[in-house]
Image (tube, coloured by chain):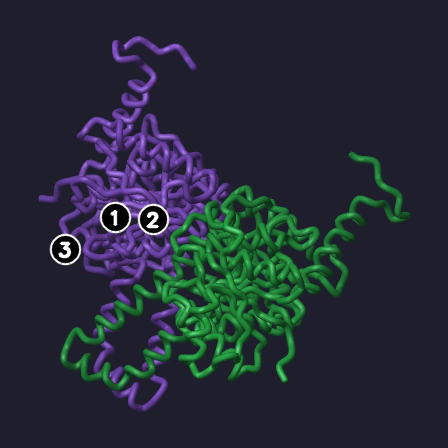
Chain colours: A purple, B green
Amino acid sequence: MHSGPVIALDAMGGDHGPQEAVRGAVRAVREHGLRVVMVGRRPELVRLLAEEDAAGAIPIVHAEDALAMHEGALASWRRPRSSVAVACKLIRQGEASALVSAGSTGGVVATSTVRLRTQQGIMRPALAVSLPTRPGPTVLLDAGANADAKPEMLVQFAHLGAAYARSAFGVENPRVAMLTIGAEPGKGNRLARKTAELLTAAAAQAPQAQRLDFRGNVEGHDLLAGEVDVVVTDGFTGNVALKSVEGAVRFTMDAVAEAMTSSTAAKAGSLLQRKALRELRGRLDSDTYGGAVLLGLNGSVVISHGASRGPAVERACRLAHDLTAGGIGEEVRSRVQSGARSARRQRLGPGGEEQPAG
Amino acid sequence: MHSGPVIALDAMGGDHGPQEAVRGAVRAVREHGLRVVMVGRRPELVRLLAEEDAAGAIPIVHAEDALAMHEGALASWRRPRSSVAVACKLIRQGEASALVSAGSTGGVVATSTVRLRTQQGIMRPALAVSLPTRPGPTVLLDAGANADAKPEMLVQFAHLGAAYARSAFGVENPRVAMLTIGAEPGKGNRLARKTAELLTAAAAQAPQAQRLDFRGNVEGHDLLAGEVDVVVTDGFTGNVALKSVEGAVRFTMDAVAEAMTSSTAAKAGSLLQRKALRELRGRLDSDTYGGAVLLGLNGSVVISHGASRGPAVERACRLAHDLTAGGIGEEVRSRVQSGARSARRQRLGPGGEEQPAG
């Protein structure tokens, strides 16, 4: 009955342990018909499945070890029997196509980068998040996988982000911008200035089908404007920007809640609005879009928030399904090959002969 | 009657022209007893002062030229007769101690850096902003003056920020943190890692009086937590973080306003809360603390928002007064000298002789 890509769910990651992972998996399977295999301690998972009235409903692959939430990235990827490592093995063996984990971002990034390896031609994987913009989400990447990046990596990130927007959200020609300071061309630090040059060149040279629709620079206050589909930056800047946005949204919502109960009149008003504001908080919640995605590896990797409950795990599974079923792997492959071809064409003369240097 | 430092107000900067500058100056003088001199086109300023019933109340220094709001930084600082340049001249001649302008940040930064020059021993000036945290404001710097910075500059920025928190807000021993990704030591990009090392060393070595109270790393979501007095970063990261925060606060307030009028019940409630939310918006408004301050030059420079109206200009004048009267120049001087002394002590042996290298 169920078809489509198989999702390997790390059932041991996250602050709330396997119970929430099992709940999310059951919902993903029953309500959305996804194919999920759970990876973790079998006896525990069997018991939890039974508690959810779902004994035998979801296959389990045993993994005796698990990454700790606050374990350093370097320590974690050396553990071959962790649930994340075993899930990666399933993907490498072709038994699954995507990994979902609520484990620590550092641990999952390190483990899956080492064990899944980057797609051919990709220098580094990038962590992408969807910001809750309207009318559609804006993909921000790199949100923290590469603290020190090179301009050439950022050009690849632009393609990775475009592939994400297309596969997960169905955006035909994603509009891509670069995060910097000052909207005019030539603004920013050395990395941003060089990257903007390369992106402009890539937009001009790629063949029509894989063309980057590079819209130029955006600034921090444009992140939530919803005017582009992809914003590209290095992992240091992207992580600072993402967390600044998250912190400011939370700060403002808390300040609103406080203001609304600061007087009797305000308090009476807030009763009438509780529902509207609860819905808004849900929309701005960073879990809403299913979590961060590590792009550019041989297999989709979705990292949901450590505090994820069942519904967040379910959304992460749906995102992993959408990316894989949407063909993100092939999309990245064709974009990277086309990028390599056009870079080569640049070096060749009109007749196809290699031009002498200088 | 009036005493204290003289503030040279660029009356020509800002989106709303000299009228708002004149209004702000009149309030600063009448309500707070500040000493202000206005720099700009004399006939226009004379007329506007008369309209405010303040003919002759504020001295005017004529400047025939003005920087355009969207003029590039490089173009602007070459204009010796601009109101900003003339205001800087007043400071260099000892006739004023501080500059206030609502002109373009790039233009004011470039012009004042060239014309006031950095204080002795300071490598680069840094742009500082106060975030509306509680219980006290948090100073974020560099917010955009130096897109490419070196670790040694960031250590100086830490001292500049501490001097600001002490002079303007009376914080006796400002707590300083560095903005990076990941709270543990050793996290971040190359610049952040090296800077954290230097800040740790500076905190250990400086003499008691000028010691940096370095509290380690903070992340983007800590910016509004109010747990430290100063957050130091490079101008690229700081500008992205600041604008991300500003954009997210605005986005959230707009979303709240929309949610609160989304149903009849919510709309009825919002009438009761309008005042509380208006006050909140005022508190979160980036103008509230008087504007960005360029630190490290021979003279305080306060750059208020281009959209500043009279009250914002008035607050900028008060901030310039507080900084100057609070002795920020001397505070920076003693911190930099003490930093140089302790760096020298490091190179010397216990007996005072220079240690052989290696």
Q: Quadrant of residue B323?
A: bottom right
Q: Is residue A45 left or right of residue A168?
A: right
| Label ID, residue A218 | 2
Mark in front: 3 vs 2: 2
- Label 3 is placed on what type of residue? Glu
Q: Nearer the viewer, residue A10 or B211?
A: B211
- Disc 3, disc 1: CB below 8 Å? no
Reply above or below: A88 against A266: above
Q: Is residue A83 left or right of residue A24?
A: right
Residue A57 in the image: x percent, y percent? 18, 50
Outermost residue toward the front?
A: B43
Q: Is residue B65 left or right of residue A59?
A: right
Subunit under mark 1: A
Mark in front: 2 vs 1: 2
Same chain? Circles 2 and 1:
yes
- Disc 2, disc 1: CB below 8 Å? yes
Residue A87 can be seen in this image: yes
Q: Nearer the viewer, residue A19 or B163?
A: B163
Identify the residue position indicated by label 1 in the image: A228
| Label ID, residue B125 | none
